[in-house]
Image: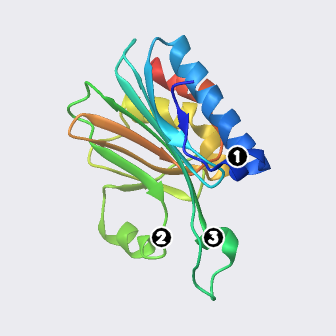
Amino acid sequence: MIIKPNASENEKTSPFYIANEKFCREFEYFISEKNGKVNGNYNAWSYIIYGKINNPKNWILKYKKATYSGGNLLLTSKYQNLLTLAEWTTNRISHNSGFLIRKKTRTDFFLFMFSKSLQRIKVSDHYILISKTNNSELITELIKKLTPLFKSGEVYKIENKNDKLTIDLRTEKHHFDIFNSISEL
């Protein structure tokens, strides 16, 4: 395995270590099937893994899980001590469609009154689209293919800026099937 453990010997019997090792093996297998390169490490508490695929387009995949200790007494441990993310990045050839899709905030109510570049997306009331162009084909296809992740709330942010598309998720899953459908765009 190219993704290496950085765990102490007593961590290696932990069910968390075993789960993280399995996650990393599945990631490495997926990237190797696409003739890509992987790098990263894992232990019982965290992992950070990278994959690069060059066919049909260049994609960089990053998955990170971090468990923090200590914290704030006012927040539950579920929200303050765990970060899980997936980030898929590629360079696109859509020069005219800079956009941002993100979760709504409380202040967006006021922005809707003053900004014509803000739109609600139809698949989920919890997200907004900020774009100066009217619905481009790329935006429409991304929303369609990511609909299950919008509905589950796993999409954190999608940004197309300076010809670089970044899909940022907050998830503990690989979602390889969804990635495969997006990589064909």
Q: Amino acid at mark 3?
A: Tyr
Packing grade of label 2 (10 A; few <14, some 14-19, many >=20) is: few
The image shows residue 86 at horizontal and vertical percentages of 51, 43
Q: Are the two marked residues, 1 and 2, in contact with CB atoms closer than 8 angstroms?
A: no
Q: Residue at x 58, y 52 (%)?
A: 46
Task: Check disc 3 and report the residue beneath it.
Answer: 79
Q: Nearer the viewer, residue 118 or 56?
A: 56
Q: Amino acid at mark 2?
A: Thr
Give the alpha-carbon distance from disc 2 to disc 3, as whole Å.
Answer: 18 Å
Q: Residue at x 68, y 49 (%)?
A: 152
Q: Nearer the viewer, residue 9 or 58?
A: 9
Q: Quadrant of the C terminus?
A: top left
Mark 3 vs mark 1: in front:
1
Element on which disc 1 rests: helix
Mark 2 / mark 3, whichever is N-terminal: 3
Task: Check disc 1 and report the residue beneath it.
Answer: 17
Question: Compared to 185, does 142 lie above or below?
Answer: below
**Residue 71 — which label?**
none
Element on which disc 3 rests: helix
Mark 3 / mark 1, whichever is N-terminal: 1
**Residue 105 — which label?**
2
The image shows residue 167 at horizontal and vertical percentages of 44, 41
Q: Are the two marked residues, 2 and 3, in contact with CB atoms closer than 8 angstroms?
A: no
Q: Residue at x 39, y 12 (%)?
A: 55
